[in-house]
Image (cartoon, rainbow, N blue to C red):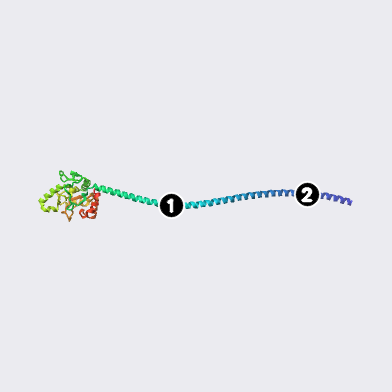
């Protein structure tokens, strides 16, 4: 019994050991399969990583190559920029030189144009002077002589409104008439009457008048009357005025409002008093006013001088503007 039991038990244990062994083997096979699968997965992962690393290496290589290319292009571009900056600087210097040359030429041209303008003005002045009567600003009171043939280039009758005796023939240089008319009209607007009693006198008219004075006053006539050829009246630019209260005469004119008005305003119209008190030529003649042009008359007034105070050379400089 015991032996059979032991044998049976051994057989049972043996059967159980085989079953366990098979289980172990099965488990080991499963483990091996799992490990193989893991190994295969790991291998694929490693392969994939190697592929990715290889790809990244290739990309890195390409990027490095592109970087190198870009650096070369950048260096080339930098060299080009430096060259262009150098060229630009040279062009800038050349431009400055050209600009300086242009300015120099422009200045020369402007100077030349100014010279041409000055020359044109000079030519214009000379042409104007050539057409202006040179006698109009000469000193004819015992200084210069006008011959018997001198007559102003044109004469014009004074309007009757400005004559003391309307029937008397009284003429002025035609270019003086506008200034004269403006002056007597301005005086009238201020309540002053200025009437002409004497204006242009020819050489022969002066000779006749002087002869009459000599008969009446003898040599004393030389103190107030010019010989023929020395009278400002022959120029056609000189006027003797009278005013209210003198009966058409001249004496007492210096004490009238008319004379005061002329002293204050005549220069504005180009007239100046020829023979003030204390002059070296004739007796005081407050009625005797000569047209010399507005510019000269104003400058004489400003200087406190009379026509005969200035040198002839200085006066001649005003001739070109006498009718401006």
The residue carrying pointer 1 sits among few (fewer than 14), some (14 to 19) or many (20 or more) residues within 10 Å by Cα, namely few
**Is residue 36 shown left or right of residue 162?**
right
The disc label shown at residue 220, or none: none
For disc 2, the marked residue is 25
Q: Secondary structure at mark 2?
A: helix
What x and y, as percent, mark residue 208? 12, 48
**Is residue 105 shown left or right of residue 177?**
right
Most foreground residue, 177 or 94: 94
Q: Nearer the viewer, mark 2 or mark 1?
A: 1
The image quadrant of residue 303 is bottom left
> Does the rendering let one see residue 255?
no
The residue carrying pointer 2 sits among few (fewer than 14), some (14 to 19) or many (20 or more) residues within 10 Å by Cα, namely few
> Does the rendering let one see residue 65?
yes
Residue at the spot 87% in from the left edge and 50% down from the top edge: 7
What x and y, as percent, mark residue 72? 55, 51
**Is residue 6 shown left or right of residue 143?**
right
For disc 1, the marked residue is 94
Residue at the spot 66% in from the left edge and 50% down from the top edge: 50
The alpha-carbon separation of the residues under discs 2 and 1 comes to 99 Å
In primary-sequence order, the first of circles 2 and 1 is 2
């Amino acid at each position: 019994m015991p032996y059979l039991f032991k044998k049976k038990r051994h057989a049972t244990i043996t059967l159980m050991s085989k079953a366990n062994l098979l289980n172990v083997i099965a488990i080991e096979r499963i483990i091996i399969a799992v490990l193989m699968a893991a190994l295969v997965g790991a291998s694929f992962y490693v392969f994939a990583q190697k592929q990715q690393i290889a790809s990244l290496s290739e990309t890195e290589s390409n990027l490095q190559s592109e970087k190198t290319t870009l650096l070369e292009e950048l260096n080339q571009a930098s060299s080009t920029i430096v060259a262009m900056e150098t060229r630009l600087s040279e062009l800038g210097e050349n431009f400055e030189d050209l600009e300086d040359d242009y300015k120099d030429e422009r200045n020369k041209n402007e100077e030349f144009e100014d010279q041409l303008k000055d020359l044109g003005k000079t030519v214009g002045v000379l042409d104007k002077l050539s057409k202006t009567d040179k006698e109009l600003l000469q000193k004819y009171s015992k200084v210069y002589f006008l011959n018997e043939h001198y007559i102003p280039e044109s004469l014009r009758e004074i309007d009757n409104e400005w004559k003391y005796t309307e029937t008397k023939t009284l003429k002025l240089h035609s270019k003086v008439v506008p200034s004269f008319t403006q002056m007597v009209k301005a005086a009238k607007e201020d309540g002053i009457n200025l009437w002409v009693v004497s204006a242009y006198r020819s050489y022969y008219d002066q000779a006749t008048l002087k002869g009459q004075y000599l008969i009446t006053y003898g040599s004393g006539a030389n103190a107030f009357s010019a010989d023929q050829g020395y009278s400002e009246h022959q120029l056609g630019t000189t006027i003797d005025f009278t005013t209210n209260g003198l009966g058409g005469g001249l004496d007492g004119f210096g004490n009238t409002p008319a004379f005061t008005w002329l002293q204050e305003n005549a220069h504005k119209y180009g007239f100046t008093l020829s023979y003030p008190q204390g002059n070296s030529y004739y007796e005081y003649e407050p009625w005797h006013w000569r047209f010399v042009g507005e510019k000269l008359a104003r400058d004489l007034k400003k200087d406190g001088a009379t026509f005969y105070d200035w040198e002839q050379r200085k006066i001649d400089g005003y001739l070109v503007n006498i009718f401006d």
